Image: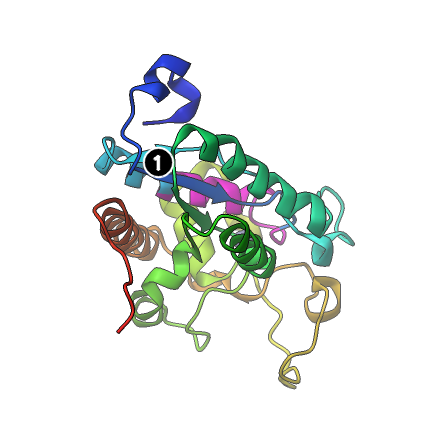
Amino acid sequence: MKLQDATWQDVEGFRRDCVVLIPTGSLEQHGPHLPLFTDSLIVTAVAEAVEARLTESVILIPTLWLGASGHHLRFPGSLSSDFDSYMGEIQSCVESLLPHGFHKFYILNGHGGNREPNGIAARRLKEAHLQATIGQSAYFDFVKTVISDTLEGPLKEMRHACEAETSLMLYLHPDLVRTGKLRDDGLASDPAVAGMVHHFDEITEQGSYGYATLATAEKGERIFDAAVKQVTQEIDRVANGYFLRGL
Ligand SMILES: [Zn+2]
């Protein structure tokens, strides 16, 4: 069920062991060829496809689109939330539903910059609500092998407005891809020192990171279908009694 389409009485009648799915995206620069809303569009498409397959066991919250994007703010149009406000939004969604008996929550992420705050928000929520089931991951982390098998370029993982992300947009929203502006970027011959915190204006020329020129809609379809299948399978497990009882 999509929460935005429900009445409060619909929600009251819904089973309490369903999974509340909270997609998190961004509105931030995606190079010269992809729109600012790219992360939010893709994660919403994945989440809606999952909800359509698990209507009876998922409550889908509208995508939290204002992400943690401070590392993109040098490019105009990017919007960012500070970390505490961002995590507060997630916590507020969860704590609005907990008193009504819903106790399983999964934060499905579509933006790399949200990864750490999503993890902290989930851990805080678990510490504050010991009986709740809380999880979080990015959709692309469910399909790392498919992504690496699909990509032709030497970068074999999701980066930014890259071969993978541009392929997903060519599949989902081809009208929004500026195909005349596709370019490879962020490919410095000197690899970054592990663990360094970089803003995108430091590591790219025009904001993208990866081999966008190799993107195709077919690759996007393959990654999208795999992500929907895998996320659906795992959310279904959470909905149907997945529980770790220790050794
Ligand atoms: Zn992105």
Number of marks:
1
Residue 202 shown left or right of residue 99 in the figure? right
For the point 31% across and 54% down, the residue is 227
Image quarter in which the C terminus is found: bottom left
| Looking at the image, residue 210 lies above or below residue 67 | below
Image quarter in which the N terminus is found: top left
Q: Position of residue 170 (x, y in %)?
A: 41, 47
Residue 124: name its quadrant.
bottom right
Q: Secondary structure at mark 1?
A: helix
| Looking at the image, residue 223 lies above or below residue 27 | below
Q: Is residue 122 visible?
A: yes
Residue 72: name its quadrant.
bottom right
Q: Which residue is mark 1?
A: 48
Q: Position of residue 191 (x, y in %)?
A: 62, 84
Give the extent of the magenta segment.
30-46
Whether residue 67 is in magenta: the answer is no
Whether residue 32 is in magenta: the answer is yes
In front of the other: 113 or 156: 113
Amino acid at pointer 1? Glu
